[in-house]
Image: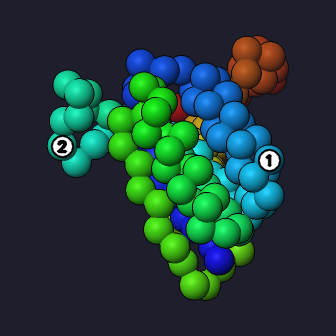
Amino acid sequence: MYYETVFIVNPDVSQENTEVLTNELVEKIEKAGARIVKREYWGVRPLAYSIQKRNRGHYALLVTDGAAEVAKLIDESLRLDERILRFLTTSITELSDEPSPLLRRRSTAATEESQAEVETKAEETKAEETKAEEATDATKAEPTAEEKTAKEESGETAA
């Protein structure tokens, strides 16, 4: 049976310590004879409502494959840890290899941002090239000091 656990860690805890907490939970799960199928860190996100006077938290997802006792172990471990604001463990019937919708949305936003940056840089480069071409055209239209001197010596004057 597959179990999906989403938990929220106190935002005062650093990301590194959140990873340590998650690693400790993974070790407990593996010692109990289950395996971790998926592990995702969703980052610091706003809470839907204030919990313990906190408005944000570190979100994490673990999908495990094991017996019902494993789900109880996860719940007990998370319930006893002071750093955990909330958690929810649910059983799932289908397992997906794809990233969670939240992680997909985040990667899509990052991809769109990087594309916008590339487009902006391309526009800036094009503008710089246009300015350089205009400057080159302007210098070609105006005779240089040497050309002016040569024209004056040959008797040609600008009318």
Label 2 residue SS: strand
For the point 80% across and 47% down, the residue is 31
Q: Amino acid at mark 1?
A: Lys
Does residue 39 show up? yes
Give above or below for 53 relative to 27.
above
Which residue position is annotated with label 1?
31
Q: CA distance from mark 1 to mark 2?
A: 35 Å
Q: Residue furthest bottom?
A: 94
User: Where is mark 2, residue-wise?
Assistant: 49
Q: Eyeballing the image, is 119 above or below 158? A: below
Residue pictured at 80% horizontal, 16% vertical: 146
Of residues 14 and 69, the one nearer the viewer is 69
In which quarter of the view is residue 153 placed?
top right
User: Which of the 4 quarters of the picture holds residue 8?
Assistant: top left
Q: Position of residue 35 (x, y in %)?
A: 78, 60
Q: Position of residue 102 (x, y in %)?
A: 48, 61
How far across and how far down the image is residue 132, in percent?
65, 36
SS category of the residue bearing label 1: helix
- Position of residue 28 measured from the top left corner of the image (x, y, whole percent): 71, 43
Where 52 falls versus 79 (above or below)?
above
Q: Amino acid at mark 2?
A: Tyr
Is 26 left, or right, of 153 in this rendering?
A: left
Does residue 137 appear anywhere in the picture? no
Query: Is 131 in front, or is 73?
Result: 73
